[in-house]
Amino acid sequence: MGRDKIKQILRYAIPFLAFIVIFGFALACGGSSHKLPKEAESITPETFKNLCEDVSYDELLRYPEKYEGSRIHVKGEVVQTLDSDQLHMNITKGSYGIWDDRTWLFLPDDSPSIIEEDIIEVWGYSDGTETYETVLRAKNKIPVILGKYVEMSELQKINIEKTEEAPEESEIIHETVQEYSRTSPAKIGDILVMEKDDWLIGKVKYEIELLEVISGGEAWEIVQKANMFNEEPGEGKEYILAKFRVKILETEGNEPFELNHAMFDVISTEGIEYTDFLSVSGLDPDLSADLYEGAEHVGWTYFLVNKQDTNPLAVIDRKSDSEIWFQLK
């Protein structure tokens, strides 16, 4: 069974199981009183966040007395909204991008608008655990978190900004990347969010933007200065240098995403792939980099095309569901 199929099954199975226990949750939530400590009012947001400790679900559940009243930081997916100031969120990211391990979060008064499946970050206090009885009369215990500061994940913020604000200088797009095809390529300044399934590290979401393109004699001058051993373009050929900005928004695991030149192909106006072997060293900054979640990198990649080619196109992850085309001239 493929990874996408498994994820699809889990995505439908998990909400169904949540429905089975919803009434038990509601009873537990309605009869409890949880309030922030008074000290929370006298600390600046930046200081408070710096004092918070990253803590796992297992630690919160196994040692509730140890962490009760401690400042903590967690990140997770909202799986169920309760009252206006309460929700359940899973805080352990597992295989196939599925979040697990339910906690009960009390929201601060100034919390952003949150719906199910949002990815959020929380800085607040551990407040022990709550035991509830499901409709099947099973007793479950979950950690309780009192949120002092709640923020949407970086990807969530981007999507909200897309719907609330019209971009001024460049068109910010966060729809399916298939729109940026060979017949409708992205241009300089377009900002796109891509999602791909990397065979080494799993699912990755990243933001990519074409910043600048240089071709012809100017491009060869840069290549020559970068390293004296870089080869001169052959007769009737020219270099094209393309500068990209890439920011890693989310990764499935802890391994870095490998950004490199081999991810790109260049296709001629006639639709023919350029297959000449090409290696250029010394470009500064170079595109190649290992990027962990949250990292941003700007660098040059390179192509060799015919001088008479009026509309060559670069394409990243060609022949995949996440391929995206860029205009180079």
Image (spheres, rainbow, N blue to C red):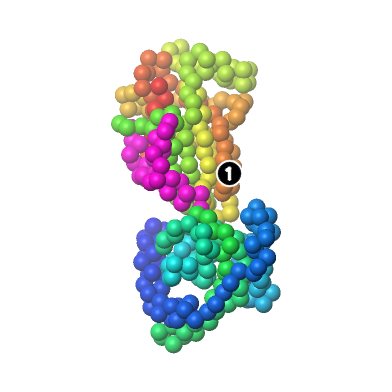
Q: Residue furthest bottom?
A: 137
Q: State which quarter of the image contains the C terminus.
A: top left
- Reading the image, the residue beneath label 1 is 295
The x, y position of residue 132, in whole percent, is: 49, 82
In the image, which residues are magenta?
153-182
The x, y position of residue 65, in whole percent, is: 67, 77
Relative depth, front residue between 215 and 320:
215
Neighbour class for label 1 at 10 Å: few (<14), some, many (≥20)?
some
Give the left or right position of residue 99, taking residue 39 as reference: left
Relative depth, front residue between 122 and 31:
31
Give the left or right position of residue 74, taking residue 269 as reference: right
For residue 30, above or below residue 86: below
Residue 107 in sight: yes
In magenta segment, residue 166: yes
For residue 37, above or below residue 197: below
| Residue under the image location 35 percent in, 44 percent down | 176
Classify residue 315 by image quadrant. Answer: top left
The x, y position of residue 16, in whole percent, is: 36, 72
Classify residue 84 by image quadrant. Answer: bottom left
**Three-letter residue code for mark 1:** Ala
In magenta segment, residue 322: no
For residue 119, above or below residue 33: above
Q: State which quarter of the image contains the N terminus.
A: bottom left
Give the left or right position of residue 67, taking residue 164 as reference: right
Give SS at disc 1: loop
| Number of numbered labels in the structure image | 1
| Residue under the image location 46 percent in, 46 percent down | 158
Residue 95 in sight: no
Relative depth, front residue between 211 and 130:
130
The x, y position of residue 300, in whole percent, is: 54, 29
For residue 196, above or below residue 57: above
| Residue under the image location 54 percent in, 58 percent down | 150
